[in-house]
Image: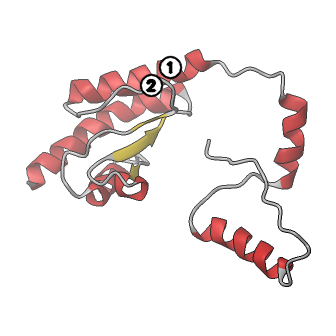
Amino acid sequence: AGERIGYIAVSPKIAEAGLVAGAITMTTRILGFVNAPALAQRAVTGLLDEKVDVDYYRENRDILFNGLIEAGYECHKPEGAFYLFPKSPISDDVAFVNLLLEENVLAVPGSGFMGAGYFRLAYCCARETCEKALPAFKRALQKAKAAK
């Protein structure tokens, strides 16, 4: 998840084409974009007829979504993503993500996606990971409420 496959063409007629291409490459790294390595890009042509079992993602989504709602989180149920974007129980989404990290749950602050006050959870992982994380979400929520 998160791999981006594509290209940008820089005309060799530009006086400093090498500098421009290098700047583009460095910018994507600094800004946090993930780009597939050349080997992965070559593999794509051989995988064009492959299918993704979206039911697997749907089941993971439902496990996490239902568990979060049951625990007391606010969250919209996505219809076509591989991540949830629940509302943080405290206004500081970075602080809440750190509470989750204490519970060995990796989440990303929503402020990194122009969604301050929320956090992002990918569910393109093993089913067991989703299931085992549910008690940790409850504990992190209790810690957040106790800190208020």
Q: Could you say whether the residue bearing mark 1 is in a helix, strand or loop?
A: helix
Which residue is rendered at x = 87% and y = 69% of the image? 11
> Alpha-carbon neighbours of circle 2 within 10 Å: few (<14), some, or many (≥20)?
many
Q: Is residue 29 left or right of residue 92?
A: right
Question: Disc 1 to disc 2, how far (Cα)?
Answer: 5 Å
Work out whether residue 93 or residue 49 is closer to the camera in this orientation and state it. 49
Name the secondary structure under disc 2: helix
Q: Which mark is residue 132?
A: none
How many residues crowd around disc 1 within 10 Å: few (fewer than 14), some, or many (20 or more)?
Answer: some
In this picture, is 134 found above or below 90?
above
Q: In the rendering, at what x and y percent does residue 52 appear?
A: 69, 22
Which residue position is annotated with label 2? 61
Measured as percent of width and height from the top left, residue 42 is found at 89, 44
The C terminus - image quarter: bottom left
- Image point (39%, 35%), residue name: 133
Viewer-closest of 110 and 134: 110
Q: Residue at x 32, y 29 (%)?
A: 76
Residue at the image position 25 percent from the left and 26 percent from the top: 69
Q: Is residue 87 above or below residue 99?
A: above
Nearer the observer, 8 or 148: 8
Q: Amino acid at mark 1?
A: Arg
In percent of width and height, residue 102 lies at: 33, 54
133 in relation to 53, above or below: below
**Residue assigned mark 1:** 58
Asked if the residue at tag 2 contacts the one at tag 1, i.e. Cβ–Cβ closer than 8 Å, the answer is yes
The amino acid on which the numbered mark 2 sits, given as a three-letter code, is Arg
Residue 143 falls left or right of residue 104:
left
Q: Quick check: 66 left or right of 19?
A: left
Q: Nearer the viewer, residue 44 or 139?
A: 44
Image-quadrant location for residue 57: top right
Residue 79 appears in which quarter of the rendering?
top left
